[in-house]
Every structure is written in C-alpha cells, then in structure tokens.
Amino acid sequence: MFKQMVSAGFRPNSNTISGLLPACATVADLIRGKEIHGYALFSGIEEDVFLFNEMTEKGCKPYHFTFTAILTACCHAGMVDVGQRIFHLMSEEHGIEPRLEHYECLADLIGRAGELVEAYELIKNMPIKPDSFVWGALLGACRNHGNVELAEITAKHVSELEPKSAGSSFLMSSLYADNGNWGDAKRLKKVMKKKRLRRNVGCSWIGITI
C-alpha cells in the first residue's frame, strides 16, 4: 500500500508514516521499515525532526542511516542545538555508536554556525580517527568564515590523508586570495602545478564544501 501511494504520486503525511513504522516493527518487516525510514527522513526538512520524534516515541528503532539523514537535515537547516541533541541520543538512548559520517555531519553543522573552535575540538577528541571528509567539513567552514589560521591547521590534516588531491590546496588558495594574501595564494598554485595535483570534484569532499 505504501509503495502504491508513492508510485501514484501521493505524498504520505507524518500521520501515515508514523502509523506504518510501528506496524513494520510488529511484524519484524525490517526491509520495508528501512524503506519507510528513508522516505520519511528525506521527504522535507520541515518535517524531519517531527518524524524522528514520532518514530522513536512509537518504539521504532532508528538505524545509523536514520541519524545520518536527520543530522544532514539539521545541518542544512542550521538547527545546531537540535542536531547536537540528536547526535548524543544515538549512544545515550539508542546504543548506537556514531560513525565517521555522523561526526562529519556534526562538524559541518557546528562549523557552518561559525563555531569553528568547537568543531575543531570535537574532531580532535573523536574516539575514532577522523578521515578527510570530517576534516574537509571543518576546512570548508573555515573557508566560509575566513578563518585562515585554523584553515591552515585543518588543511594539513586533509593533505596528509589525501596527498594526491589538490582539494585542501585549492581551498587554501581561495582563502588566501579572499584575504588579500596573494603571495601565499600564488605559492600554493605553483605547488599544485609542480606536484601535478588534481582537484577531484566528483568524489572528494571538496565538491561539498565549496
């Protein structure tokens, strides 16, 4: 019935979705439950938080990708407090340990809000080693907020993890230019050319943070 509604062009509302999820849990229909989870959390930012609360209140267990979806929605909506609360609920109430993608979302969320030092401290104190996407989220935030000093520190971490990518150098070059530091901007461009570094937009975090 749910698939027929969506295929026919009907958009299930929050009452429909929150009613279907407990039913899936009751009959242990894990696959359909996951499908509805995914649809619910990508159906519109304005309903995401409400649907998440409805799911958990009705006893429907959230998955890792559920938290990725809701944290991403919070990030794009600038809902810092809500996003941080949901991040901590993962382990505290649902027994789900955050993965790299969850830390990336949280770092991006905090960084976009301009809390760059807080985002940096979050990454430094992660219980798992941050990858280039986590550091890249912070580097993009530093670029957007014009924080050269922290960007230089962050770019070094990205370069160590992606030595063949020009992503961090490209962002730093743009940041230097924006701040009128043409000498460093030109120096980085020469380094990129000498090392023949390529800006791989298709599969790198650089395509997200610009």
Image (cartoon, rainbow, N blue to C red):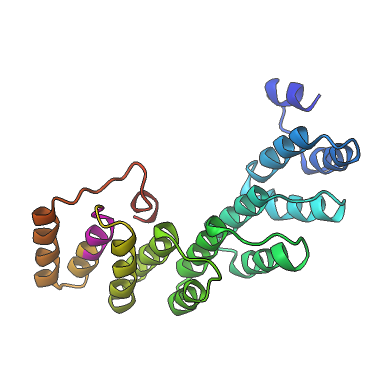
Q: Is residue 96 above or below residue 200?
A: below
Image quadrant for the C terminus? Answer: bottom left
- Report the residue at 12% width, 61% height from top: 191
Whether residue 71 appears in magenta in the rendering, the answer is no
- Name the side, left or right, on which 159 lies relative to 87: left
Pinpoint residue 23: horizontal percent, then vertical percent. Answer: 89, 38
Residue that lies at the very extreme toward the right in this rendered image:
26
- Report the residue at 54% width, 63% height from top: 103
Image quadrant for the N terminus? Answer: top right
- Name the side, left or right, on which 150 lies relative to 60: left
- Report the residue at 53% width, 55% height from top: 101
- Report the residue at 19% width, 63% height from top: 173
Pinpoint residue 186: horizontal percent, then vertical percent. Answer: 9, 64
Provide the major secondary structure of the magenta segment: helix
Q: How many marks?
A: 0
Whether residue 170 appears in magenta in the rendering, the answer is yes
Q: Which residues are magenta?
A: 165-172
Q: Is residue 47 above or below residue 202?
A: below
- Name the side, left or right, on which 208 lies relative to 59: left
In the rendered image, which quarter is residue 18 located in? top right
